[in-house]
Amino acid sequence: MGSERLLLVTGGSRGIGAATALKAGTRDYFVCVNYRRSFEAAASVVDGIRERGGDGIPVHADVGREKDVTRLFDAIDALPGNLVGVVNNAGELAPAARLENMDYDRWKSILTTNLFGTMCCTREGIRRMSRRFGGVGGAIVNVSSAASRTGAPNEYVDYAASKGAVDSFTIGVAREVAADGIRVNAVRPGFIRTRIHAEGGDPRRVERLQDALPMRRAGEPDEVAEAILWLLSDEASYVTGSFIDMAGGL
Ligand code: NAP
């Protein structure tokens, strides 16, 4: 636990979050791997980080619950070193449906995780990283979606709306904290091979739709992780309020 540079990856137990956490561990970050349901999955990501010569810890929190987020950041505060980065990756969707068949509870769950979770972790990250409050500065990367641009009609307009809100939030907060030493950016992936599609009730979604993409293939979590790591890094020192679209040309 010697590293001084703490990075939080929400939803780090699998998919894009796990790929990001694993790569971050090789780039001089001590990685706080947040999970909601599976301690074992998060612990195995931490094992992977250690096998690659890095270090980290699994930290539980449902990012949609403010009390959990407070506990998550309390755990980070107890670590030696400074928080220098937050990756707001935790996200969920629900089975494909048209708007007239969606209920209110579904919207509440999606908005709570995807938008409120991102807002809450961003606020806590800023309170710790901002030079305005004695922090050392840092970077935040939000994992939005190509759906924020397409609107995801007939599938997930609620999910798309949550990601559209994340985009607006990214732009506004980036401008708000730019002079305080914090950069805020987002990636907008689409059709990445992860379990989110199965969780949304359609495990073969990527295989079914990938031929319609300009690049004729799905993306891999590692490809998204690489962009996230770049946005976090000093190589991106003049980039804020920006988006990297990663959807095979969509
Ligand atoms: P995934 O494999 O389903 O991973 C999602 C992760 O988020 C899981 O670790 C999940 O953990 C966690 N999570 C969900 N709700 C949470 C909550 N309230 N609190 C804490 N953790 C929570 O999906 P993924 O594709 O890697 O998704 C990562 C991000 O990429 C999401 O924001 C998603 O919207 C975005 N994205 C993905 C794609 C794609 O094609 N895969 C495209 C566009 C955008 P639990 O299972 O424990 O809840």
Image (spheres, rainbow, N blue to C red):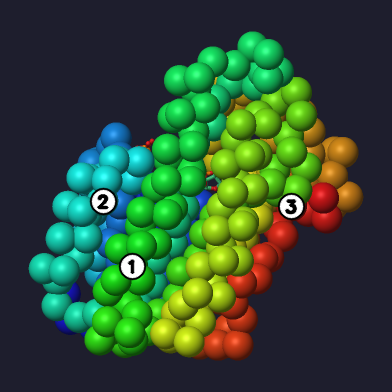
18 left or right of 207? left
Query: Does ligand 1 reach within 8 Å of label 2's beta carbon?
Result: no
Q: Is residue 48 something one can see in this rendering?
A: no
Task: Please tell me whether mark 2 sits on a helix, a strand or a loop.
Answer: helix
CA distance separating discs 1 and 3: 28 Å
Label 1 vs 2, first from the N-terminus: 2
Residue occupied by mark 2:
69
CA distance separating discs 3 and 2: 30 Å
- Up-down relation of residue 206 to residue 50 (above or below): above
Query: Does ligand 1 reach within 8 Å of label 3's beta carbon?
Result: yes
Q: What amino acid type should be assigned to the residue bearing mark 2?
A: Val
Residue occupied by mark 1:
125
Q: Quadrant of residue 53?
A: bottom left
Q: Quadrant of the N terminus?
A: bottom left
Which is nearer the eye, 49 or 149? 149
Q: What amino acid type should be assigned to the residue bearing mark 1?
A: Gly
Q: Quadrant of residue 3?
A: bottom left
Tell me the residue at 33%/45% (across/down): 63
Label 1 vs 3, first from the N-terminus: 1
Q: Is residue 181 something one can see in this rendering?
A: yes
59 left or right of 210? left
Residue occupied by mark 3:
247
Q: Residues within 10 Å of mark 3 (few under 14, many from 20)?
A: many
